[in-house]
Image (cartoon, rainbow, N blue to C red):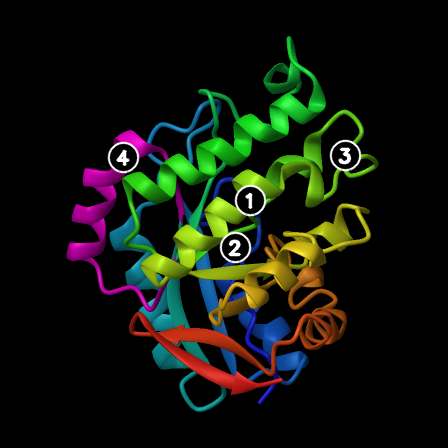
Amino acid sequence: MNVIDSHMHSSFSPDSQAEPVTMIRQALRDHFSHICFTDHMEYNHAEEQFELDVPAYIAALRRLKERYAKKIELHIGVELGLEPWLADSFHKLLQQYPFDFVIGSVHVADGLDPCYPEFFQGRTEKEAYEAYFQAVYDNIQAFCEFDILGHLDYVVRYGPNRNRFYTYEKHKEIIDEILRCLIEKGIGLELNTSGFRYGLGHPSPHEDILERYHDLGGEIITIGSDAHSPEYFAYEFTKAQNILKKCGFTYYTYFKERKPRFEKL
């Protein structure tokens, strides 16, 4: 079995034009036996409308799950855009719908998405990164009913200097607090390969953070491409597996019916 891509989007997310069936066909071309959709669910995103039509989404994916049952196993996941004040809404959502897998991601800090330059105005790059990491920590404290934390250092994609001066050591205190909190609450960490697509030369989070998570006792690690179109499905997954091995991992994780499954790398 190929490594499962546990983070990918379709046209149910407003930032993707890919019909779900095109992503499935790409997975079949690449000889994958499993696929997991994790389209965006964000109530009142800072700048755009990312609220998922959950009934339509689940109905469409269930039809495809049945249609392709003999060729591929389809998992239905979701990526929650975390903000502390949304904890009750997300709790009710997860009680109502039977997702296989739930990613918790922070796309908004201090009321802004770091993809917009305004997030960095009036503070140094280091201060902006610290503000984002603090928002990640605050979100985990407010709501912990998700399975893994997505792209922990998402903010670095958009910094004025991106990752030129960014290191784990510069933000070690708050990042370690995040990692310890995840481990304590039984939440996993994602290796997101989109950093390679964005030209950073590293996954998200950086290898040093992945290694630190392992050293602290973290065991739940998923791999996701964050693909929004078929050509980026399972992007740089061989590299991702090699990174995890170098960080000390011997297994990676995927989820089915909200339960972690461990597969040897």
The kind of residue tagged 3 is: Arg
* Marks 4 and 3, the one that precedes in the sequence: 4
Considering every residue shown, the one lying at the far top of the view is: 122
Give SS at disc 2. Answer: loop
For the point 37% across and 66% down, the residue is: 76
Going by the image, does 61 lie left or right of 211?
left
Q: CA distance from mark 1 to mark 4?
A: 23 Å
For the point 34% across and 55% down, the residue is: 146
Going by the image, does 216 lie left or right of 237?
left
Q: Could you tell me residue 181's position as x and y percent?
A: 40, 51
The kind of residue tagged 2 is: His
Q: CA distance from mark 4 to mark 2?
A: 22 Å
* Marks 1 and 4, the one that precedes in the sequence: 4
In front: label 3 or label 1: 1
The kind of residue tagged 4 is: Leu
Foreground residue among 216 and 261: 216
Label for residue 159?
none
Q: Which residue is mark 2?
A: 9
Q: Which residue is mark 4?
A: 86
Q: Marks 3 and 1: CB-CB under 8 Å?
A: no
Label for residue 162?
3
Q: Marks 1 and 4: CB-CB under 8 Å?
A: no
Report the magenta residues as a range: 80-102
- Taking 263 as reference, is 65 above or below it? above
Q: Which residue is mark 1?
A: 175
* Marks 2 and 1, the one that precedes in the sequence: 2
Which image quarter is the N terminus in? bottom right
Q: Could you tell me residue 46's position as x and y percent?
A: 45, 23
